[in-house]
Amino acid sequence: MAPFNFFNKKWQAVSLLSLITILFTLLIPTLIASSPVKDPEFVVKEVQRSINASLTRRNLKGDSSCSTGNPIDDCWKCDSNWDKNRQKLADCAVGFGKNAAGGKDGKIYVVTDSSDNDAVNPKNGTLRHAVIQDEPLWIIFESDMVIKLKVELIMNSYKTIDGRGANVHITGGGCITIQDITNIIIHGINIHECKPSGNTNVRSSPGHFGHRGVSDGDAMSIFGSKHVWVDHVTLSNCDDGLVDVVEASSLVTISNSLFTQHDKAILLGHADDYTADKSMKVTIAFNHFGEGLTQRLPRIRHGYVHVVNNYYTKWKMYAIGGSASPTILSQGNKFVAPDDEKSKEVTKYENAPKSEWHKWNWKSEGDEFLNGAFFTASSGIISSSNATFFTSYSESSSSSSASDITAKASSLVPKLTANAGALKCKKGSAC
């Protein structure tokens, strides 16, 4: 493999300041990964406040404004110089993945070659070469490209894949694997037709490669990783899942993404008996779950999941399901049920009788239910178009219960999710 050549100075010429900088960079992942986790209800409140603030700014500017009230997009999307300020995006996340730094403050790496011919010694200029490097990198694309992976693309910590300004499609074997690392941002790409692959050697860093078994064919697999943000990604039609968050992964946000044409879309939690996933915390916000989806939007085991201001249009089996007593807070979503009378229910309790799941914590607050959709809370309360409950959050409230917080009205969801999926951004103008 060719030596990595971003730095030309010899070690003996490196100043003391440079050495300190390098050491600090190496320590950052450990410091962030070990930082205390905020109370989940506090993070939920933060999301609501950011939505409130963004909608207030939009109302003050008027309907002619580029702003939509979506706090993530309004943070960066209206800037006509976004291509010169790409790393500002890292300051725009909300929810549990808010602190995912990605390649912020790292160098820009431009992918110029769409090939993927060697998983052990990847060619300089390819996406595989970029994602395995040790230092933080903000990865962009020189032009439109379709990257057909030979095997799963194994990432290293502190990387951003930023597809803005190009039409980037990732397909083939794998596809993206985020395993035992930290601080990843995936933004503005299309992932589809991912197939099982492997049983071969794959490089995961400049200094390491090893044998990998056969992958499942997920669009994106997140194993044992923290501080991950997936935003404005279009996902469809892979052999297994679209996004898996498993094996003690946590502090993840999946936002502004478009999911279509797939059976099992999002899996959160490895297995009912894998109790390490009790620490899992995931935010699902401003996504559009579109046509041709069957189930797992998401499906949760253990952990705490905030599902807020998403647009659901006609699943085939169910929308939100789970087992092993996860906490699920569904707020301000718009659920449009399929025409099939047997599939109107949003929720699905799995692997437990009612006497058991009645003790779990599933809540619907401010959701909208259309075409006969209904949500069965763990308390037994059924929310539907005829009977919903809506509890508002007050800044003066002394209660810290998640039931005292509410998302913005679900009637705003079509506006908040209008740009879900990979954007068509042009340099020199707002996206």
Image: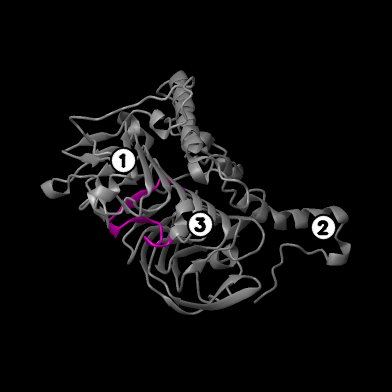
Q: How far separated are the C-alphas under marks 2 and 3?
A: 36 Å
Residue at 45% in and 53% down = 278
Which of labels 3 and 1 is toward the front?
1
Which residue in the protein does label 1 denote? 311
From the viewer's side, name the closer residue of 68 and 384. Answer: 384
Q: If you read the primary sequence from the N terminus, does the residue marked by circle 3 or circle 1 appear first? A: 3
Where is residue 414 shown, x and y percent of the image? 32, 35
Where is residue 105 shown, x and y percent of the image? 67, 48
Where is residue 291 shown, x and y percent of the image? 25, 50
Residue contact at pointers 2 and 3, CB within 8 angstroms: no
Q: Is residue 240 visible?
A: yes
Left or right side of 190 for 383: left
Q: If you read the primary sequence from the N terminus, does the residue marked by circle 2 or circle 1 appear first? A: 2
Give the structural element (helix, strand or loop) at label 1: strand
Name the amino acid type tagged 3: Ser
Residue at 38% in and 52% down = 234
Height in image: 166 above or below 388? below
The outermost residue toward the front is 355
Which of labels 2 and 3 is toward the front?
2
Name the amino acid type tagged 1: Tyr
Q: Judge the density around disc 3: few (<14), some (14-19), many (≥20) Cα neighbours within 10 Å.
A: some
Where is residue 380 shown, x and y percent of the image? 24, 39
Height in image: 56 above or below 407? above
From the viewer's side, name the closer residue of 370 and 1. Answer: 370
Which residue in the protein does label 3 denote? 143
